[in-house]
């Protein structure tokens, strides 16, 4: 068995900072919209705002202008005792470009577990930096559910859903948008966008150039359709990688393990993007055109590897100044048909998320035993099993996150520790894993070499060495799993 650890997965762990706590910080519980607004405006670095479940009615924009720090985020979290999710209802707003639900101008915030509904414009508009938006939903807003703009950079949108967004002109609302004057380094991980009037993701630029956005394990489904299933007047793409008024701007895009299915026009769309587009282990199914990069206003570079394009309604187009198209489902004599897959049910991609917010386990596009797409890919730095990567967004015979369990729910003991600590975890099957320690700013400080661990109980000894007193992130990752935990050192 061969496996490579995905750098992007490890970087993701560095954004899971909600686990870090400090005794001097303030915990605030809110029960209504007024209390929420007060708590947000007065919060400082390290504070936690806990939101009770239930319905919250807002009629004005929630503006967040203050900031946390790289080591101490300000967090908005669902209350631990909640039996229902907090629903933030902005439907009393009229449709207007100034009527966003949440305007996040601050930096170093962590916002988790809130359903945002009915905004007069964006459900959330981000112009700050280094924010983490996790396990939130954005629906029935009058513009893009979540938009990054005005220089917003290095934000991570994790395990969020955006759907049924539509404006009255029946033309403009996307699921997610990192566009116009957005900054660089933004990431979407484990997100879904469906039944949005315009695009699932829109990367159109105006006034900014040469930025990079990353998409990992994201699904774009049935975009271009309205909530009632009828076709709208928008563009109807799954992932619109870029584009600009003068058709000259570069929006570099990196797609890993992403799926575009059932979108009216293109699954993965060029739209005059002049940048570099990379697609590794992606999948496109039953879009108007699964992959469309045209010879007009040609891209600088297009690299597609280990990707499935199946049953699109028009022929795909692959054009760029530099073109690298290798080991995909239509190459090397491979024959791709319905018999390669456990399921082609697009609607299954809309199943409920797991309780931790991660994507549901689905059979869609998973390869059946004996498919010639298994082990037919090329190593692109994404974890794999067998002699080579599979083609498509899912790797067969991989350890799932549900097969990886910390001993008694604790990653390491003792914690805090002064000299050494024991990392203890259980595996349902043998697996290659990587164990690493990160600073809160994302720097890798220590790492165990990637190793094969046996099924059952495994124990590692971590010596402190040169780690200063403070908070760190312990990450354990493998082909299809990632677990993180706080690690605290003391003198």
Image (cartoon, rainbow, N blue to C red):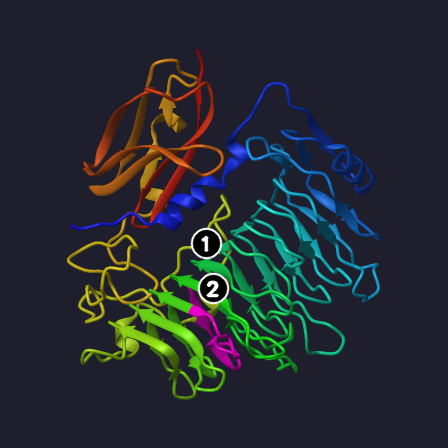
Q: Secondary structure under badge 1? A: loop
Question: In the image, what residue occupies the spot 37% across and 43% down?
Answer: 482
Question: In the image, what residue occupies the spot 44% across and 28% down?
Answer: 472
Q: Secondary structure under badge 2? A: strand
The foreground one among 342 and 420 is 420
Residue 219 numbered tag = 2
Residue 330 vertical placement versus 253 (above, below) = below
The foreground one among 46 and 278 is 278
Q: Say if the magenta span includes residue 238.
A: no
Residue 332 vertical placement versus 29 (above, below) = below
Image location of residue 132, percent across then percent down: 57, 45
Image location of residue 368, percent across then percent down: 24, 66
Q: Say if the magenta span includes residue 265.
A: yes
The magenta stretch spans which residues? Answer: 258-276
Q: Quadrant of residue 47?
A: top right
Residue of label 1? 359
Question: In the image, what residue occupies the spot 42% across and 67% down?
Answer: 259
Image location of residue 303, percent across then percent down: 34, 70
The foreground one among 104 and 220 is 104
- In the rendered structure, the answer to whether residue 1 lies left or right of residue 281 reads left
First of labels 1, 2 by sequence position: 2
């Amino acid at each position: 068995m061969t496996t490579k650890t995905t750098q992007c997965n490890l970087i993701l762990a560095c954004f899971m900072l909600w686990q870090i706590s400090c005794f001097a910080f303030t915990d605030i519980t809110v029960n209504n919209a007024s209390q929420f607004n007060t708590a947000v405006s007065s919060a400082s670095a390290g504070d936690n705002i806990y939101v009770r479940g239930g319905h919250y009615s807002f009629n004005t924009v929630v503006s967040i202008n203050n900031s946390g720090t790289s080591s101490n985020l300000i967090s908005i979290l669902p209350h631990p005792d909640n039996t229902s999710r907090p629903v933030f209802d902005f439907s009393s707003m009229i449709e207007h470009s100034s009527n966003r639900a949440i305007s996040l101008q601050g930096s170093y915030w962590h916002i988790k577990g809130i359903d945002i509904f009915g905004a007069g414009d964006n459900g959330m508009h981000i112009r700050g930096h280094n924010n983490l938006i996790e396990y939130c939903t954005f629906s029935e807003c009058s513009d893009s559910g979540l938009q990054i703009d005005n220089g917003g950079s290095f934000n991570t949108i994790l395990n969020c859903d955006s759907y049924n967004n539509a404006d009255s002109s029946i033309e403009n609302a996307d699921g997610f948008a990192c566009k116009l004057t957005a900054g660089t380094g933004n990431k979407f991980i484990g997100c879904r966008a469906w039944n949005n009037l315009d695009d699932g993701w829109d990367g159109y630029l105006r006034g900014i150039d040469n930025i990079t956005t990353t998409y990992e394990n994201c699904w774009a489904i049935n975009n271009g359709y309205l909530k009632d299933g009828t076709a709208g007047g928008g563009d109807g793409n799954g992932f619109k990688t870029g584009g600009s008024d003068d058709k000259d701007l570069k929006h570099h895009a990196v797609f890993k393990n992403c799926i575009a299915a059932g979108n009216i026009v293109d699954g993965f769309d060029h739209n005059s993007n002049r940048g570099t587009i990379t697609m590794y282990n992606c999948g496109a199914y039953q879009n108007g055109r699964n992959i469309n990069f045209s010879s007009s206003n040609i891209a600088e570079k297009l690299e597609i590897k280990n990707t499935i394009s199946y049953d699109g309604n028009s022929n795909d187009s692959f054009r760029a100044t530099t073109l690298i198209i290798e080991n995909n489902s239509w190459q090397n004599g491979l024959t791709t048909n319905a018999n390669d897959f456990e399921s082609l049910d697009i609607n299954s991609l809309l199943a409920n998320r797991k309780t931790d917010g991660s994507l549901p386990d689905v059979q869609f596009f998973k390869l059946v035993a004996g498919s010639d797409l298994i082990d037919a890919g090329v190593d692109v730095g994404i974890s794999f099993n067998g002699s080579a990567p599979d083609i498509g967004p899912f790797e067969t015979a991989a350890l799932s996150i549900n097969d990886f369990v910390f001993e008694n729910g604790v990653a390491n003991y003792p914690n805090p520790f002064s000299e050494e600590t024991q990392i203890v975890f259980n595996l349902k099957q043998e697996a290659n894993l990587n164990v690493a320690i990160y600073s809160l700013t994302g720097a890798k400080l220590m790492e165990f070499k990637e190793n094969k661990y046996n099924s059952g109980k495994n124990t590692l000894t971590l010596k402190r060495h040169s780690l200063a007193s403070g908070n760190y992130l312990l990450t354990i990752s493998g082909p299809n799993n990632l677990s993180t935990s706080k690690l605290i050192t003391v003198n």
